[in-house]
Amino acid sequence: MSVLIVTDARIRELNRTYRGIDSSTDVLAFPMAEGKFAALNPDLIGDIVISAERARVQAQQAGHDLIDELRLLAAHGTLHLLGYEDETSRGRARMRRLAQKYAMSAEGRR
């Protein structure tokens, strides 16, 4: 898995190109287990792209530091790579709970 931290403009471009949505977002996940190249390397689960600017704003709004927000977004993206979806309120709540759990368990590894 790779994690790439980019500008808001770059994540907007990726969101437009790959999802057809012309707006920025906080995190995108690109699973490698799907599509015509899925069999190239079954050990790769995919790529996560995070907007640095969006992460900074969200960290301030949540009252925690940038590192904690980056952990949350990386955990959220990883959940997407593993097949979790957040299109419904139930799915969003589940992903929020799991991302929080995994991000906080990574906190002790600093």
Image (tube, rainbow, N blue to C red):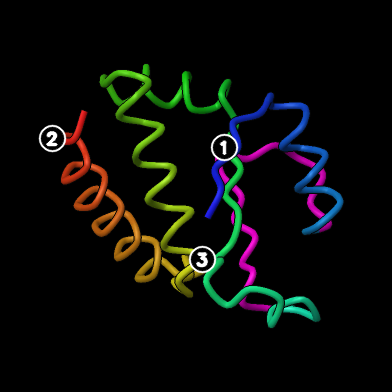
Q: CA distance from mark 1 to mark 3?
A: 14 Å
Which residues make up the magenta segment?
20-34
Q: What quarter of the picture does the C terminus occupy?
A: top left
Location of residue 1 in the rendering, given as x and y in whole percent from the top left corner? 52, 55
Q: Secondary structure at mark 3?
A: helix
Q: Main secondary structure of the magenta part?
A: loop
- Total label count? 3
Q: Residue at x 36, y 31 (%)?
A: 69
Q: Is residue 107 above or below residue 37?
A: above
Q: Nearer the viewer, residue 82 or 98?
A: 82
What amino acid type is highlighted by mark number 3? Leu
Is residue 74 left or right of 43 when viewed as pictured? left
Residue receiving disc 1: 50
What amino acid type is highlighted by mark number 2? Gly
Can residue 24 be found in the magenta stretch?
A: yes
Location of residue 82 in the rendering, given as x and y in whole percent from the top left corner? 45, 71
User: Which label lies toward us, 2 or 1?
Assistant: 2
Can residue 71 be found in the magenta stretch?
A: no
Q: Is residue 53 above or below residue 68?
A: above
Residue receiving disc 2: 108
User: Which label lies toward us, 3 or 2?
Assistant: 2
